[in-house]
């Protein structure tokens, strides 16, 4: 506690902390969190922003630090830049309390980028709920919050789009209705988010809609559609994916190669080998990685087929 108090004193004086001292703000107990909350308004703006930014960097580099409670304090910062950085500090958190912090930010934060960032992180909790690793009672407020934002026409398309993508993994009839409404709507941001959400659903029912976007004149839609098809992993789409190996947009070609690797199977492997024989040398590493991924995907499918039924 003495070290912690010393760190707080340095922060209120505007000092820049070295990583070893920033790590002291990891794994805060409730007493320390309360003390940080009390001291936070006294820390200069520049110091607060630098502190949260460095905490994010430290969390990316080390597995022995955990800044959830620290970030919970920073989420209340009056500066949007600090709040946005605090959301990044929570990116790897699987604690349901993190979602409890993010739902009000999604709902009430006046800064579009901050609210959108909260929605993006909540998508991981939606996936856990769908997979059964998050309790329904903990997931219900998340789903309700995201649904309310998607349906709120006052909110910006950017925030609504992120909320819609977060809902993508949830297999409920009203989620399907929201995706179709956005897909056929007039707002391009929401239409593109519907394509992304279809991929995150991992549901083959959306393949026909995604393949439709392979013909889109806008390369952004072709790109997101091929990424989504790769996420779903449907072997039925592999012929169409291979057609994009000659797309005029290099990003789409790269995404198609990666999608083929994700899907795997003999057909995908044949297409990748054929493309490797024709592609420029600088494509070699990308294609090799896709072939490795295809091998893993194929092996995983074979193992599932060989599992005895109970």
Image (cartoon, rainbow, N blue to C red):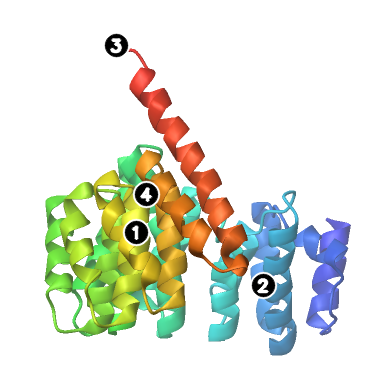
Mark 1, secondary structure of its residue: helix
Instruction: Decide which of tag 2 and tag 4 comes sooner along the chain.
Output: 2
Mark 2, secondary structure of its residue: helix
Q: Position of residue 58 (x, y in %)?
A: 74, 63
In the picture provided, is 42 more to the left or to the right than 3? left
The answer for how far apart the CA atoms under marks 4 and 3 are is: 26 Å
The answer for how far apart the CA atoms under marks 1 and 3 are is: 37 Å
Disc 4 target residue: 127
Question: In what quadrant of the picture does the C terminus appear?
Answer: top left
Relative depth, front residue between 188 and 56: 188
Instruction: Decide which of tag 4 and tag 3 comes sooner along the chain.
Output: 4
Instruction: Decide which of tag 1 and tag 2 comes sooner along the chain.
Output: 2
The answer for how far apart the CA atoms under marks 2 and 4 are is: 35 Å
Mark linked to residue 242: 1
Relative depth, front residue between 117 and 264: 264
Q: In the displayed structure, would residue 62 be above or below residue 86?
A: above
User: Which of pointers 1 and 2 indicates the residue nearer the eye?
Assistant: 1
Q: In the displayed structure, would residue 45 be above or below residue 63?
A: below
Q: Position of residue 194 (x, y in %)?
A: 24, 68
Instruction: Decide which of tag 1 and tag 3 comes sooner along the chain.
Output: 1
Instruction: Decide which of tag 4 and tag 1 comes sooner along the chain.
Output: 4
Mark 4, secondary structure of its residue: helix
The answer for how far apart the CA atoms under marks 1 and 2 are is: 58 Å
The answer for how far apart the CA atoms under marks 3 and 2 are is: 57 Å
User: Which of pointers 4 and 3 indicates the residue nearer the eye?
Assistant: 3
| Mark 1 in CB contact with mark 2 (< 8 angstroms) | no
In the picture provided, is 183 more to the left or to the right than 170? left
* Residue at image coords 18%, 72%: 151
**Badge 4, how many Cα within 10 Å: few under 14, some, many 20+?**
many
Disc 2 target residue: 38
């Amino acid at each position: 506690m003495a070290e912690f108090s010393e760190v707080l004193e340095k922060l209120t004086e505007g000092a820049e902390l070295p990583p070893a001292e920033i790590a002291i703000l990891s794994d805060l107990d409730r007493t320390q969190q309360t003390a940080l909350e009390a001291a936070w308004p006294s820390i200069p703006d520049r110091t607060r922003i630098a502190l949260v930014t460095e905490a994010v960097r430290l969390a990316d580099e080390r597995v022995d630090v955990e800044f959830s409670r620290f970030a919970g304090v920073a989420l209340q910062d009056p500066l949007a830049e600090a709040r946005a950085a605090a959301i990044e500090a929570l990116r790897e958190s699987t604690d349901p309390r993190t979602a409890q912090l993010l739902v009000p930010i999604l709902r009430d934060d006046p800064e579009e980028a901050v609210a959108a960032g909260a929605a993006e992180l909540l998508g991981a909790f939606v996936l856990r709920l769908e997979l059964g690793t998050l309790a329904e009672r903990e997931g219900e407020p998340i789903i309700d919050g995201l649904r309310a934002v998607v349906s709120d026409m006052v909110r910006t398309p950017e925030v609504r789009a992120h909320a819609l993508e977060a809902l993508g993994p949830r297999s409920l009839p009203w989620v399907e209705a929201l995706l179709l409404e956005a897909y056929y709507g007039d707002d391009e941001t929401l239409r593109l988010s519907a394509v992304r959400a279809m991929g995150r659903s991992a549901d083959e029912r959306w393949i026909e809609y995604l393949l439709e976007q392979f013909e889109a004149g806008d390369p952004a839609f072709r790109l997101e559609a091929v990424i989504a098809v790769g996420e779903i992993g449907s072997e039925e789409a592999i012929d169409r994916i291979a057609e994009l190996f000659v797309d005029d947009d290099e990003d789409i070609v790269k995404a198609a190669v990666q999608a083929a690797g994700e899907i795997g199977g003999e057909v995908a492997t044949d297409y990748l080998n054929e493309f490797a024989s024709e592609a420029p040398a600088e494509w070699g590493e990308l294609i090799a990685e896709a072939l490795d991924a295809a091998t893993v995907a194929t092996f995983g499918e074979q193992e599932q087929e060989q599992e005895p039924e109970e």
